[in-house]
Image (cartoon, coloured by chain):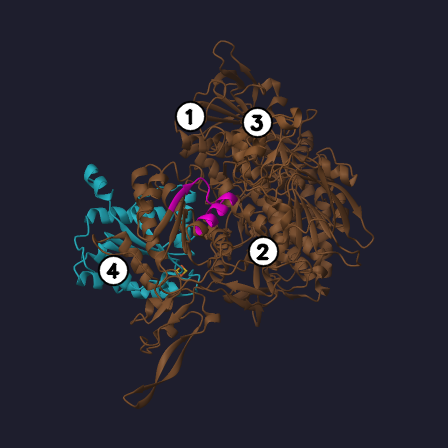
Chain colours: A brown, B cyan
Amino acid sequence: MVEARSKSIDSTKPSSKLVGEVLVVGVGVAGIQASLDLTRLGYHVTAIDKSMTIGGIMAQLDKTFPTNDCSLCILAPKMVEVYRDPNITLYQNTELKEIEFLANGNLKVTLEKKRLGIDEEACKNCSECYNACPVRFQEDISWFDAGLNMRHAANIPFPSAVPPVYGIDPDKCLHVNFGICGKCQDICPANCIDFDFTSQIIEITVGSILFATGSTQMDPSMFPTLAGEHPDVLNGIQFERLMCASGPEGGEIIKLSTRQHAHRIAFLQCVGSRSKKEGELEFCSSVCCMYAMKEAQITKEHDPDVECMIFNTENRACAKGFHEYYLRAKDDYGVKFMQGRVASVKEDLGSQDLIIAYEDIRTGKVKEEPVDLVILETALVPNTKPMADILGIELNEHHYFDPGTVDSLQQKGIFLAGYNIKPMDIPLSVVSGSAAAAQIARRLSKSRFDRIVEKEFPPEKNIRQGDEPRIGIMVCHCGINIGRTVDVEWIAEEIQKEPNVVVAIHNYYSCSSDSQVTLKEMIREHDLNRFIVASCTPRTHEPLFRVTLQEAGLNPYLFELVNIREHVSWVHMQEPELATQKALELLKMNVAKVRGLQPQQRKKIDIKKTVLIIGGGPAGLHAAWNLAKQGFAVHLVEKEGTLGGAVNKISREFVLPRERAILEKLDALLGEIRNEDNISLHMNAHVDEVSGFVGNYNVTIVESSSEEAEVEVGAIIVATGAVQDPTTENVAGGNVPRVYTQEEFEKLIEDRTAGSFKKVVFIQCTNQRDDGNMSSDFPNCSGICCKISLKQAMMLHEADPSIQITILHRGMQLSGDINAESLFDDVQRFAAIARYSPDNYPSIEHDGENIAISLDEVNTGMALRVEADAVVLATPFRSISNTKDLAMKLKVPVTHDGYFLEAHVKLRPVDFATEGIFLAGSAQWPKTLDDAVMQGLAAAGRAAGLLAKGFVEVEGITARVDEEACIGCGKCAEVCPYSAIEMIERDLTIDMVHITVPKAHVMDAMCKGCGTCVGECPTHAIDQRHFKTSQISDMIKALFPVPGEDVACRRLAP
Amino acid sequence: MNETIEQESGNFQPRILTFACNWCSYAGADLAGVSRFQYPPSIRIIRVMCSGRIHPEMILEGFARGADGVLVTGCHIGDCHYIKGNQYTKARMELVPDLLEGIGIDSKRFKLDWVSASEGKRFSEVITSFTARVKELGPNQLKLSNY
Ligand code: FES
């Protein structure tokens, strides 16, 4: 099946040009994003994964923080998209064996694809082989259920795996080893079992390679002192599988030893990470604090009486909204946070309970407690070794490439994404995938579209007047997201009784690839001409199902998605009966609506291949440079007289080695950008007005408060950055001299004024990370200030080792940086570090001359008093002051703490919901330099992907006029926000008298489908396609039925 | 099922016809779900692209068919995805209370409110408070069976 989609063995002739073909190694969430972006950008992708399915770790997760979205539900549509993309050739069970660097810059790669005894092209994913296979054995931890499930020799990782193809384990198969059995072969209806386990060698030539091979979580059995071998001691991924409704225990959180429900669960953080021990990792894995809190929350959702304790030295929750997530876990869910690490886990031989021993920080005594389950949030180890071996390059002590190596690899066409760059969560992995795609597109810009083929659909079934609506329905359990609250099976039964509903089924995950096959089969088998899926929000999932309809030969508009998750099961968790009733009523309303659905056509609209970038900081600059080099015209608007933004605030006097490379690149960019023909700079400028739509925005830029420039652009990137809060007064109780923000202090270091101080105290988390006991309006953690303080402490010390430095913190936030822990170690050698409690911010006293800071030190329980001649406060970083104003002009949302809000916090981190507008850098949330640059590149890649073809397709939901009913009043034309309605003259003959009358006329290409004209028309002469007045009326009628009323539709409306 | 629940609990469960625009209020409702902000199961949303699509007659039809309340939601003024569709919504909806009183429906059963895509909490609050108000007013007695 898979090979049929590929051009199999390569036929490229050597040429002098780089080829428009990219190899993506590892198809987890980063690889998926990069692959999809690359095909949009005009490149063919060969994507390989060493396992049987794509999806990586994200497919194994139960939920994702901070939204507690079901992980597979949001990932599955993307997996399906990869599988369906005619420009992606997908090879599973495949590894990269060799890279040959060709003289013309291309890379010749050798791939080895293992065959698993099944003819993949013929496999229909029917599961007969699995059911017939008599071999059963415990899977190993690397398998999909992380070792918690039994497997058969004939198997698939999970039912909605992509590609949906089974495979046989040759080590376990009776036929392979003993020549007996062969039951699967006998039963397979598709005759696809051939017991062929040979390898296929594939050679192709590509212009670039992207490595996105992710990470592997350490096996808990590596930790004998924590009873890692015990069946009730699991690592994070194993626990995700245990919690998951589609996991091995159906989502029952049980002790695997006794199969009884777990009542007390301990989550142990930083196991195998932040450690100097042999074989362990020195850096923070960066995601475990957040997902442990998620696991605890979800456990509490399963059963509020389960006691969840999280053990860590500090809680790292420092991205957008993360600290509030922590507060929710603590206050709303009642998750217990125990400061300190667990020393040992033992099994009580009598009761067989697990006993954890830990130091109670408040009393200093070692405590022992029995628990049912222990979750070791073990380190995530980057899967970089195979890549390093193939390239013949050494990894550093952290298992990563040094920055210099990464640079030189990029010159040769080799890029990295996801955990191969550094530890990161899902959104940053997505960003890194888009960023890599942008960089590759820049390298291969001359071969754009060389190898791209257009997706072809079967001819559309003709929907004629007089055809009876035949509706098919799929009601989704969504694991247990819907099924736990709403009686899905009953609803499917009930809705099948409605007139015109031909078939209604219920299933686990409607968005998975196998469900798409089911859906298409339903359409074919029952000759359906309308379809409804009742699952989640159409705002994310409608596009997926529409394509499925197209593949089944139905117009994509003959579909409706009914939201019974976000709008029902998740908001009525305590009222299952009423929720079920509501879900059924919503379905009935939509059955009424789809009876009247008609095929619609999408329009292609020409677009401007120009991008407006607002903000000339690190993100904006990299976005501009990348786009210009890809061949797009760029307007860069900067509010200051100089480019650079936050880069200008960073002292070059003392630069940390890890920042040096990024700064050098940025400084070079600042020099070159003026000479780049594709970039028009607008300095001292701001965006005054924005109108238009995706592909065609008209923007007025005001320069130096007088001159105006009108530009037409296809896309807009917002990269306006963040600034540190200057208000320090309320903290120090009045205006204390020599109290600075970090940004101010950086300037003093640059000016060498800071060197005159002899005692410097840094106070972290000032006016932020509010646990509900400060008056701050900034509840979250800015996420970058701890790293800044460490850097500044280092700089001070290097300048003058006699300066006494003190850092007062409440749990250092050092995730997302492999060097941060060792930097902290280095700083601790010369600086005094003390920790204060969140509810007891240090008090700053002064007599005009001297400053003294008092605090209660948490770890020692002692009251401390520190003298200072300068105090540096880590105040919050805020989105720039006119964010709200700009958001209003762009029609994009802002969060309650004043930052721009992206389309989806997990999977669309640089997009806005409004098509054609993108978000980059600290405008999304405060960022370190490397992350800001990555986001800038990602936004450039997303914008370029949108504009590359030169046109966009817009929805076919435009207005249309019934001229007979139109009285020519012109009200519709008056209210149309896009001037898409013109009044035309029509000749009319009444009783032999010729007159002309005015009629409204919609100019399709300009109509955006808002329907405002329809709401205004006094005679119902104007209507909106796909949202017809009659359909809305039918929905109301279905909601409030009148007994005996005939609702069935025997034939379609014209 | 509706009837049985009403009788068993002796508890009036109002049903509120709700219109939401795709870009703000529907998204706000999505966010309420994602954030698990609980609210009463009273509303039945009809999604339209913009609140400007909503014709006053749809509201009358809802009441005539038996809706206990009708709620119209859209983007905050100035935030409309289609520039100014919601300004017309506002102007049109100002006429609705008088129309309702004219046919004997308490205009308190009708509400127009704005909820942005980032206001999940607010969405749940709007629904909770409006449901309480409609509950207090009791069932809509005007069910024109042959509307
Ligand atoms: S799009 Fe929300 S009111 Fe117009």
Residue A147: mark: 3
- Labels 2, 1: front one: 1
Q: Is residue A3 inside the magenta stretch?
A: no
Amino acid type assigned to the residue bearing label 1 in the image: Val
- Crowd tier of the residue under label 1, counting other residues whose Cα lies within 10 Å: few below 14, some 14–19, many 20 or above: some
**Residue A511 is inside the magenta segment:** yes
Q: Marks 4 and 1, Cα distance to the nearest angstrom? A: 49 Å
Amino acid type at image mark 2: Ala
Disc marking residue A306: 1
Contact (Cβ within 8 Å) of mark 4 with mark 3: no
Q: Earlier in the sequence, mark 1 or mark 3?
A: 3
Q: Which residues are magenta?
A: A504-523
Residue carrying label 2:
A719
Co-location on one chain, circles 4 and 1: no
Specify the subunit that label 1 lies on. A
> Which label lies toward us, 4 or 1?
4
User: How many angstroms separate mark 3 from mark 2 (CA)?
Assistant: 44 Å
Q: Which residue shows up at 30% across the image and 65% down it?
A: B92
Label 2: few (<14), some (14–19) or many (≥20) C-alpha neighbours in 10 Å: many
Q: Are marks 4 and 1 in contact (CB under 8 Å)?
A: no
